[in-house]
Image (cartoon, helix red, strand yellow):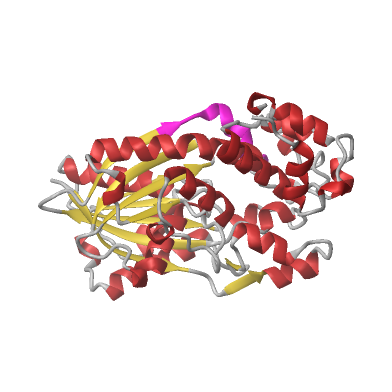
Amino acid sequence: MPARIAGIAGYLPSGTLTNADLAARFPEWSVDKIAGKTGIDSRHVAAPDQTTSDLAIAAGLTLLARDGIDPASVDHLIVCTQTADYVMPATSLLVHHALGLRSSAGATDITHGCSGYVYGLGLAAALIDSGQASTVLLITADTYTRLINDADKSVRTLFGDGAAATLVVAAESPGIHSFVYGSDGSGAESLVVPGGGLGPAGRFPAADPASRGLDSNGYDLYMDGTAVFNFAIRVVPETAQAVLAKAGWPGEQVDSWVLHQANAFMLNHLRRKLGVPADRFVVELGDTGNTVSSSIPLAIEAAREKGVAAPGTRSVLIGFGVGLSWAGMAVDW
Amino acid sequence: MAVDVRELVAEILEEEVGSVDLDSDLEVLGWDSLSDLTLISIADERFGVTIDPKALADAETPADIAALLAPAA
């Protein structure tokens, strides 16, 4: 059967990192200049005793309670995160248990970043379309701030922690469809956490914390902003055209475009390149920063009062980032 | 299309064009990672040129920027 999105709920930890906080930490930093470019005023930060599964569980419980969903109705849980609580077991197992899902429900982790929401929805739709599930809970959650070196202001300005839960259910007509995917591991060095894994140190020389003048925190997330920007400029328009062609939609019939909320500067460039009017293009990251795979569902929720995701409307969603990985899809709400 | 790189660099840095020479030190002028992104955006949008990030990282002067924009000249 086809699938549709039945509900989305976000969770943001209560701690914040504001531009004023960053300006106090980095006196040479120009708050107005950076905020003007990124569109980010503040980010949420998980408390020291909060982990990714805590955020995921909070988002899941919020969705289940708000929409009156019986946990026993969930056939499969997909958790998308790059900041797993443990190397093993999978975070989805911890979340599955805490949400009280039935033991015959599947639990799967996927480890994509900014493309992860679309990948997760694609897998959820496939589980339903193949008859393996009727109801899939997709939870995106990350505590990226843990991966960032305290002294690296270039990425501290961008990323925030957060989670979102999305319920995908079987439907009479396709609500989520026209998925397209892309992968290019040759760009892995553009956005990478060089520490904390089992791979050899030094595989990605540009990301080496010592060469960046950093005292390592064990992770030291590295981003080559120019390479990622070039990547986005290249793949997002191609992906948009591929989704429109697959859906059979003229671009002007799309009511809202929701791209991964990387930063406002990049989003506004992509909007102009796509030729989309500003009132049909969602930019919602001022209070959250870039929340990785949760950025699209959190932006949808933030923009609902503007009519985004209203019944009968159409959206195109596009995620892109670490991997390099990208994906796009169409939504009939 | 001829690109006046001094004007372009001044525009990106929000400085007077008189403060920019072809052999000025970009770092001294205040060029930073945001300037890189602004240049990539302008090069793509205005000139249809893709800037090579590695070459951009090595650029030290407006003349070097001009070389990156050569396909637009």
* A137 left or right, relative to A279: left
- Look at the picture and state if A31 lies above or below A133: below
Q: Is residue A184 magenta?
A: yes
x and y percent of residue A233 in the render?
Answer: 52, 38
Report the number of discs. 0
- Look at the picture and state if A180 lies above or below A47: above
- The residue most toward the left is A172
> Which residue is more in the foreground, B14 or A184?
B14
- Please report the residue visible at 66 percent of the width from the left and 46 percent of the height from the top: B38
* A148 left or right, relative to A72: right
x and y percent of residue A229 in the render?
Answer: 59, 41
> Which residue is more in the foreground, A247 or A196?
A247
> Which residue is more in the foreground, B36 or A191?
B36
Let me know if residue A197 appears in the view: no
- Look at the picture and state if B65 lies above or below A49: above
x and y percent of residue B54 in the render?
Answer: 71, 30
Which of the image's four quarters has the C terminus of chain A? bottom left
Let me know if residue A234 appears in the view: yes
* A193 left or right, relative to A259: right
Q: Is residue A57 magenta?
A: no
* A145 left or right, relative to B9: left
- Please report the residue visible at 19 percent of the width from the left and 60 percent of the height from the top: A312
> Which residue is more in the foreground, A115 or A15?
A115
- The residue most toward the top is B71
- Please report the residue visible at 76 percent of the width from the left and 33 percent of the height from the top: B65
What stretch of residues is rendered in magenta?
A182-195
